[in-house]
Amino acid sequence: MGKGTWLGHIFSSISRLAAVLSHHCHHYSSRTLTENLSLNRSASIIRLILISDLNPPSLLIQFRCYGHRRHKRHFPRPSGRYKHASAVFGEKLYILGGSRNGRNLSDFQVLDLTNFTWSSLALSVEQNDVELENGNLQLQEPFSAISGHDMVVWGKKLLVLGGQPKKYSNYVTVRFVDLETQQCGFVKTAGKLPVARGGQSVTIVGSKLIMFGGEDINRKVLNDIHILDLDTMIWDEVEATQPPPSPRYDHTAALHAERYLLIFGGCSHYTCFNDLHVLDLQTMEWSQPETRGDYATPRAGHSGIAIDDNWFIVGGGDNKSGALETLVLDLTKFVWSVITRVNKGDFLASEGICLSSALISGEKYLVAFGGYNGKYNNEVFIMKPKLKDPAQRKIFQSAAAAAAAASVSAAYLIGLGNQTDLAKVEDANSEGYEIKHPQQKYTVDLDTIRGELSALELSLAQVKEENSLLRGKIDDTNNTHAELSKELLSVQVQLADERSRCFKLEAQIAELQKMLQSLPSIEAEVLSLRRQISTLERNMEPTTFQRQASRGVWQWIAGGNA
């Protein structure tokens, strides 16, 4: 049995188990049903979560993947990290760099999705990317330590853009990894090069890469748009019309219908966002559509993947805690739905997590790795979304199926005491809209049921919309409160400084007052001294006259002798 067939058999068995569990899920009050399954000694430990309140349900699987032994060499699991980059090529998940304990990483890890074993990718530098130093050829290191970058698949190569490397550059650099030759190097680009940044989003559209936002090396938050033509490797900066999203980083981006670029969430230096923006790539015009459904909490550092008409969002967080909800946005109706909600402290509620899409045994899966929620995560989570396909929708739109479904709904609504015979419902034809019960016969008014169902759906949509608006107002209030708290703290600091200055001035004033209090006594002493001097001068006047007279007699005698 091949590796892909083996994995497909496992997921097929898990799906059948999920179907059985979902048939009985109404007996349980909890939202999720968790069961631990052990495949074998060398395989992974699986945590299976059945989302019981979805129709059809989704599967969330946690694989605790171990390294494998090959030629007596052991490859352990990569260290926990966040702000790394991931990409899927074939049936392998590639992980590059990231940050851990305040230091950037440079390792290149590979997860084989057919047997869930880790290995390291040993890269060599392409001959064109050597440098001459002191007359000797010195190979550059394959990848310097980096975080906050993006990695996309282009042909049989991986392209790495942006991020905050150990060796800073003034502009965004583009590097490649050739998965066939396992060589790497720089891609020479030209045009209007974007300034170096991290936390940007990079989306591939045909033969072009669209980069939006990020934070530059001077911590300036950006909201500019740059497009790289992958055929010519020329950058261009695009000016779009209408108000753009506010400057942000650590957001997510997705492409819909090969025309619309969607931006969700992210943060500035002061707040996190939960707004949705759409850029029409034909008219280069921004818009902000109104969303409905469940409330999408503000978050940054999350990750997203668009599959068909659904955009899946996992992880992230705000200034207070991690985002507990995994979301999906219906891109045709802009309706948010919560797929699952994890407990606080769960690794899925992490910032800097990476989410990728993988095609395994012909089915699409979501693969999440890494993140930080107080601890650095190195677990692998796999989700298999159970989406309604177009073929199923067409079957349910047929007359017989619609009649059967409506009849079952009617029987449930009027409170049948006994269970409905599902076999008879499936065999119902388009000519008769009746369900025969062993004891009673019920005729269903389809128009009435459909009208009531439409009214209920409308009321439910209105309630959800009101709740969404209220949550938005609460979020705005919380943001305003946070800003006011910061301003209050700043004012309090200034007030403390002013109080310190006032205290010093009061001390100086007290000293001056003491000096002023002693001034009258000093004046009295000065007056007394003046009186003494005056008295002394009066007493000295006769003595001075006598001396002058005596001096005159002697002068007369001396003159006479002469």
Image (cartoon, rainbow, N blue to C red):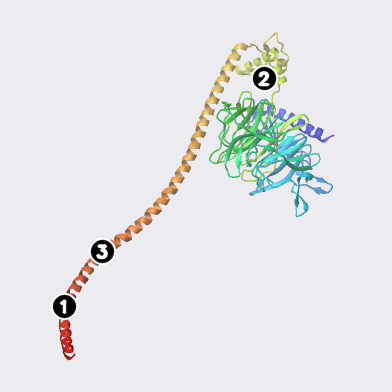
Outermost residue on the top side: it is 431
Where 372 falls versus 464 (above or below)? below
Q: Which residue is mark 2?
A: 419
Q: Which residue is mark 3?
A: 519
The residue mark sitting in front, 2 or 1, is 1
Q: Nearer the viewer, mark 2 or mark 3?
A: 3
**Residue 38 percent location from the top left of the image:** 75, 39
> Closer to the camera: disc 3 or disc 1?
1
**Alpha carbon separation for disc pair 2 and 1:** 140 Å
The 10 Å Cα crowd at callout 1, few under 14, some 14 to 19, many 20 or more, is few
Which of 323 and 150 lies nearest the eye of the viewer?
A: 150
- Tell me whether the residue at label 2 lies in contact with that at label 3, contact meaning CB atoms closer than 8 angstroms: no
- Residues at circles 2 and 1 in contact by the CB criterion of under 8 Å: no
Dot 2: few (<14), some (14–19), or many (≥20) neighbours within 10 Å? few
Residue at which label 1 appears? 541
Residue drawn at (46%, 46%), measured in percent from left and top?
Answer: 490
Q: Is residue 344 visible?
A: no
Mark yes or no: residue 552 visible: yes
Horizontal and vertical percent position of residue 208: 70, 32
Q: Quadrant of residue 217?
A: top right
Could you say which is closer to the camera, residue 150 or residue 100?
A: 150
The N terminus - image quarter: top right
Check disc 3 and report its element: helix, strand or loop.
helix
Q: In the rendered structure, are the residues bearing label 3 and label 1 in contact, judged by CB atoms less than 8 Å apart? A: no
Horizontal and vertical percent position of residue 337: 61, 28
Residue type beneath disc 1: Glu
Q: Is residue 135 left or right of residue 524?
A: right
Say which amino acid is labelled 2: Gln
Q: In which image quadrant can residue 399 be found?
A: top right
Q: Earlier in the sequence, mark 3 or mark 1?
A: 3
CA gap, disc 2 to disc 3?
A: 108 Å
Q: Marks 3/1: CA distance? A: 33 Å
